[in-house]
Amino acid sequence: QGKATKADLQLLQRLSNLLPKTSFCGLGQAAATALSTCLKNLRSEFEAHLTGNCPAGVCFTKQESGEQ
């Protein structure tokens, strides 16, 4: 919905660190690994999307819709 903030990104980082230690199943652990890898390797993409920009040009952004 385009309402994420840097605090949300920080929360995702904390969760990706916490889930492998607290998940009872491999699925939870694997999801955390995938999230952690994305945050590590694609952080600039996440941060760009926080400002309503899509570097790859594939997302419908607030700028394109005329939203403030």
Image: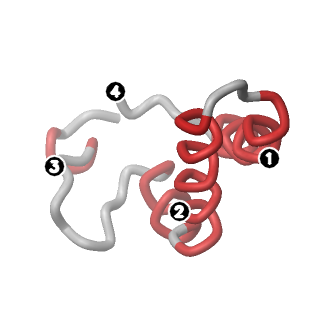
| Residue at image location 16% in from the left, 61% down from the top | 58
User: Within 10 angstroms of label 4, few (less than 14), some, or many (20 or more) residues?
Assistant: few
Sequence-wise, the earlier of marks 1 and 4 is 4
Mark 3 to mark 2 CA distance (whole Å): 25 Å
Q: Which numbered mark, 1 or 4, is in the foreground of this view?
A: 1
User: Considering only vertical position in the picture, is 68 above or below 51?
Assistant: above
The quadrant where residue 25 appears: top right
* Disc 1: which residue: 17
Say if mark 1 contacts mark 4, CB within 8 Å. Answer: no
* Disc 2: which residue: 38
Q: Amino acid at mark 1?
A: Asn
* Disc 3: which residue: 64
Sequence-wise, the earlier of marks 3 and 4 is 4
* Disc 4: which residue: 1
- Quarter of the figure that contains the N terminus: top left
Q: Secondary structure at mark 2?
A: helix
| Residue at image location 60% in from the left, 38% down from the top | 26
Q: Which numbered mark, 3 or 1, is in the foreground of this view?
A: 1
Say if mark 3 contacts mark 1, CB within 8 Å. Answer: no
Mark 2 to mark 4 CA distance (whole Å): 20 Å
